[in-house]
Image (cartoon, helix red, strand yellow):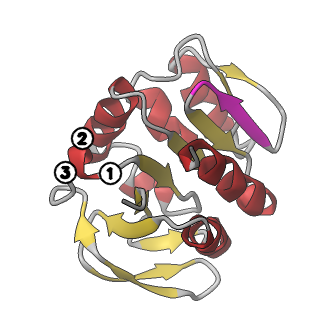
Amino acid sequence: MPPNVLYVIAPERFRDEELLEPKRILEQHGATVTVASTRRGTATGMLGAKVAVDCTLQQAAAGDYDALAVAGGAGAPSHLWDSEALRSIVKSLHAAGKPVGAICLSPPVLARAGILAGRRATAFPADRALLELKRGGATYVEEAVVLDGTIVTASGPEAAAAFGQTLAGLLTP
């Protein structure tokens, strides 16, 4: 069975390459990628990408997935940081020992889900994102991609390919 990856984006203003590049890499490694958001329809990226949303976060059952990735972008704080459904998925997959990743302005989702306490993590160096990491007990590391156990965090668009490769590596037996 190919691994199933749930890739979460904001319904608007997600960072295009933080979805498209890792998704391409994951699919090249044989993964099936399901795109989820807070609402169905077409999500629009900051650079104009139009992406069909396969399911809402409420419809996504954590047990159906082998990994989770969360794209960043300007829409992440308003659409994803406070999502109870997303936090629940993060907690379930992490508790099952499955890879969980977030890039750019989305690592605060992991911090708010309580899985970054005592962990090394990175994020886009915006003050509010770094404050969320600190509140969540993470140690901020100024690196493009940080792997701590099964948790992958990345700093932003320039790290999208390395983020995808790191996630794919965790899914390859």
- Residues under numbered marks 3 and 1 in contact, where contact means CB atoms less than 8 Å apart: yes
Residue 164 rendering spot, x and y as whole percentages: 66, 58
Vertical comparison of 133 with 21: above or below: above
- Residue type marked 2: Glu
Q: Which mark is residue 42?
A: none
Label 2 secondary element: helix
Residue for point 55% across, 31% down: 150
**Circle 3: is it few (<14), some (14-19), or many (20+) Cα within 10 Å?**
few
Residue 169 rendering spot, x and y as whole percentages: 65, 47
Label 1 secondary element: loop
Indicate the quadrant where residue 90 lies: top left
Q: Secondary structure of the magenta portion, mostly?
A: strand
Quadrant of image for the C terminus: top right
Q: Which mark is residue 61?
A: 3
For marks 2 and 3, give the one nearer the viewer: 3
Q: Earlier in the sequence, mark 2 or mark 3?
A: 3
Q: Which residue is mark 1?
A: 65
- Residue type marked 1: Tyr
Q: Which residue is mark 2?
A: 84
Vertical comparison of 59 with 67: above or below: below
Taking the image as shown, residue 15 lies to the left or right of residue 88, namely: right
**Circle 2: is it few (<14), some (14-19), or many (20+) Cα within 10 Å?**
some
Q: Earlier in the sequence, mark 1 or mark 2?
A: 1
Q: CA distance from mark 3 to mark 1?
A: 8 Å
The stretch in magenta equals 145-149
